[in-house]
Amino acid sequence: MPRKTTKKNKVTAKKTKVVVEPLLLQTIRGMKDVLPGEQLYWNKIRAVLDKSYPKYGFQRIDTPLVEYANLFVRSIGEGTDVIDKEMYKFSTKGRDRVALRPELTAGIARAYIQHGMNILPKPIKLFCIGPVYRYDRPQEGRYREHWQANFDIFGEKDAVMDAQLIQLAHSVLSSLGIKNVQFQVNSIGCSECRENYLDMLTAYFESKKRKLCKTCKARLKTNPLRILDCKEDKCVQVSTNAPQTVDHLCNDCRDHFKNLLEYLDELNLPYVINPQLVRGLDYYTKTVFEIWSLSDGSKKSLGGGGRYDGLIKNLGGEETPAIGFGLGLDRLVLEMKRIKAKSYEAPSPKIFIAQLGNLAKKKSLNLFAKMERNGILTAESFGRGSLKKQLRTANKLGVLITLIIGQKEALDDTVIIKNMITGTQEVVTQEKVVPSVKKMLKMKQMTIIKKKAKKK
């Protein structure tokens, strides 16, 4: 017989406690929004860069934000702050070890090798712009996500390329209104002459070891050259009397640096030799430089660069001389604001479309498209109700002509053309509105030219 169940089994479901993380409506530390009010400065920088790089024979290249992590370890070098402390590294679902790019040059060099650019006519000039990522203490103009623009030249070892890049940097900054600049230049030699120099440098710092900061004491074994770049006061004082790279260059490096200085003198560019300048990345050879703004008596670094003649070969390519520099765009924006440099001025519309009623709104959309196809910059406020408010908006914008479509005009397929300067109006058909507007704008332009000619 089947067994009778006298008690119902009670099944108690375990309730899983769902933890809901609070939504923080703010950017994470070291990241920032670029709001519309600040975009005017960014637009000015982009416009100047877009005009500058083709003028100097550069072609644009864009590389991924994410690369294999060992690309940066191999190029930048272990023992550097970028690799040891600042790089964003993680594993993908496919277990690839990757990193957010901490700088642009390594990715550009990788692309140069991967796509066989070595067979192209030399020199090969490449321009790149985009965000880079470094997990560092956020500071003014240096966020964990910040933007850089890079100019790189491959396949030419002559110092004239070094000088031309510095000339290009000076031209870009002048076009942005940043005129009081100074280029800090130095030569850190090549692998041959640097070996003996590093022995001398290490011996010097060993004798002053107790005066160095904790980080620089560790650098004595891994990267003694980086001690010269330390910003700690006690390390700066020790570095002042350290052996200088320019005094221990081989003949080739000495001639290269001498030629560079002669080119800079010929171009009348503002520079000083800074024996402590080494830059923070291992791939640099020979020329290194930084760009300082000296406005208001303060010194602010806006970018820098140098030669990296051994990088392509180190990454697996053939021996290729190369040089490049980068500009920090966030710092450029801050500097433009600080010195009150002129920001980007968007072209102002000369035409405004006003409408009244649903049918008129449909006709206005079509008219707006006609103006756009004919290259006539036009403003509107389709969401506004009264005609009075729309005309008030047109006055604030300072347009020359307002095109009005009311209910009658929408039915008749006509448009009222109102001259905002004289106040006169005329009614034309939809077919004639574009030619009529062009004629009026041309007449206005001729009047402006005649007034300027009389003033001269």
Image: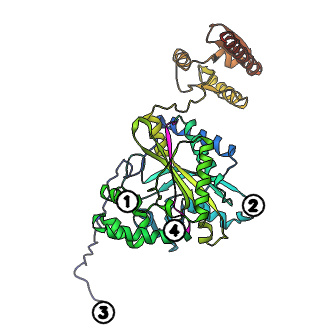
Q: Nearer the viewer, mark 4 or mark 2?
A: 4
Amino acid at circle 1:
Ser
Q: Which residue is mark 4?
A: 194
**In terms of secondary structure, where does tag 4 sit?**
helix
Q: Is residue 179 magenta?
A: yes
The quarter of the rendered structure image containing the N terminus is: bottom left
Q: Earlier in the sequence, mark 2 or mark 1?
A: 2
Above or below, comparing residue 310 to residue 259 in the picture: below
Q: Which residues are magenta?
A: 178-191
x, y percentage for residue 318? 67, 70
Residue under label 1 = 239
Q: CA distance from mark 4 to mark 2?
A: 31 Å
First of labels 3, 4 by sequence position: 3
Label placed on residue 120: 2
Amino acid bearing label 4:
Arg
In the displayed structure image, the side of residue 365 where residue 131 appears, left or right: left
Q: Residue at x 71, y 66 (%)?
A: 116
Give the number of the mark in front: 3 or 4. 4
